[in-house]
Amino acid sequence: MAIPVFDLENLQAICDVLADTEAGLTGSQIGRLLAQMGIADSEISTKRHRLFDALSRRQASDRSGNHVGAFVQGAIAPVRWVGRTSEWEAMKRALEEVLRFSGLAIDDAGKIIAVEARMTLSKPQSVAPTISELPSARPTPEALRQQRIKAVLPDLLAEFIRLRAESNRQAAGRMLESLLNRLFDVFGLEPHGSIHVVGEQIDGSFILDGETYLLEAKWTRDPIGEDQLLVFRGKIEGKSNFTRGLFISVAGYTPGSQSALVRGKAPNFAMADGSHLYRVLNGDWDLPDLLRRLIRLLGETGYPYVPVADLANLGPPV
């Protein structure tokens, strides 16, 4: 049976039931079932957000809810609940409360069937197993993007705050790379992780408006000085003549470090710090809009670093 894309509010409700702390799947069960269904797992720690991120990605890629339906069927398969009949019935009822808003139900064999969609909480519609009654409207790509951002940012922000207390700053730097990869991914910037080429390592890359940018990210105890900025400029210059870059130093930059970049050469990358990153993680600013603003100011003024205070009129992602 073909299943249309789930409304994201419905999908989140499904994930809330499946990942319920008391009655839902454990984290390891979620991971195994995602793997069995061929669905890429998420690195988010909270179960319900992890599951929502994985399933919303897959249905957006498929433009179909089939894999979501397969996951639900796998989770509710009676064979998984042998000896726990009452728990299975409770889970089935909880899932159906949500699924009926998408015109779906679960039969006694644990299979998804088509029914007439429920329109309200108080007056469910009668069961009528016909695929023609399934809703045909699909959320727009922008709506999917906004819902994913709302679901993922709280966990990323919590992780960012935890990293502040990490005593091993080298480990914090590695974890920052992972965090940034997930952040750039949720904003649709097609990130690549660490890149190794002969004689050097680059923390990552991303694509903004069709242009490739190299990424360098540091979270040291002290502000970054001009020496590391000049090394990054050399890495960019060693690539193509259209490659640009973004340097993120959570601890900021030393006074005068920016001047070294503009002395005698045109800068080829923009710079951001922890304040910029926090505003994005907190949902105050849209990441692509922030990057476009930094790149435009770089082109207009020749200065790669613009403080947060000078970007206060940026808007949120949703």
Image (cartoon, rainbow, N blue to C red):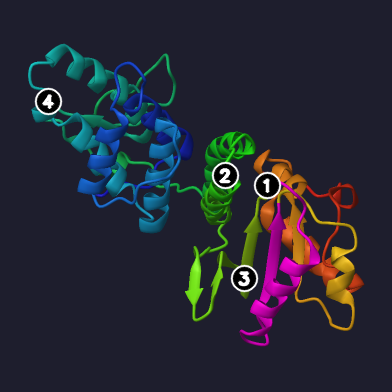
Q: Mark 2 points at which residue?
A: 149
Tell me: residue 197, above or below residue 34.
Answer: below
Q: Residue at x 62, y 86 (%)?
A: 240
The segment highlighted magenta reads 221-249
| Residue 317, disc | 1
Q: What residue type is labelled 1?
A: Pro
User: Which of pointers 1 and 3 lies earlier in the amino acid sequence?
Assistant: 3
- Which is nearer the N-term, disc 1 or disc 4? 4
- N-terminal label among 3 and 4: 4
* Spatial separation of the CA atoms under disc 2 and disc 3: 23 Å
- The residue carrying pointer 4 sits among few (fewer than 14), some (14 to 19) or many (20 or more) residues within 10 Å by Cα, namely few
Q: Is residue 89 above or below residue 230?
A: above
Q: Which of marks 1 and 3 is in front?
A: 3
Residue at the image position 68 percent from the left and 83 percent from the top:
237
Q: In this view, does 302 lie to the left or right of 287?
A: right
Marks 1 and 3, how far apart in space? 23 Å
- Amino acid carrying label 2: it is Ile
Asked if residue 126 is among those painted magenta in the image, a careful observer would answer no
Q: Can residue 129 be seen in this view?
A: no
Residue ID for mark 4: 108
**Camera-nearest residue between 189 and 256:** 256
In this view, 100 is above or below 239: above
Give the crowd class for mark 3: few <14, some 14-19, many >=20 residues within 10 Å.
Answer: many
- Whether pointer 1 and pointer 3 mark residues with C-beta atoms closer than 8 Å, the reply is no
Calculate the distance from the C-alpha at mark 1 to the C-alpha at mark 4. 43 Å
Mark 3 = which residue? 214
Q: Which image quarter: residue 128?
A: top left
Q: What residue type is labelled 3?
A: Leu
Q: Circle 4 — which element?
A: loop
Q: Nearer the viewer, mark 2 or mark 4?
A: 2
**Left or right, 291 with reference to 90:** right
User: Would you say residue 259 is visible in this rendering?
Assistant: yes
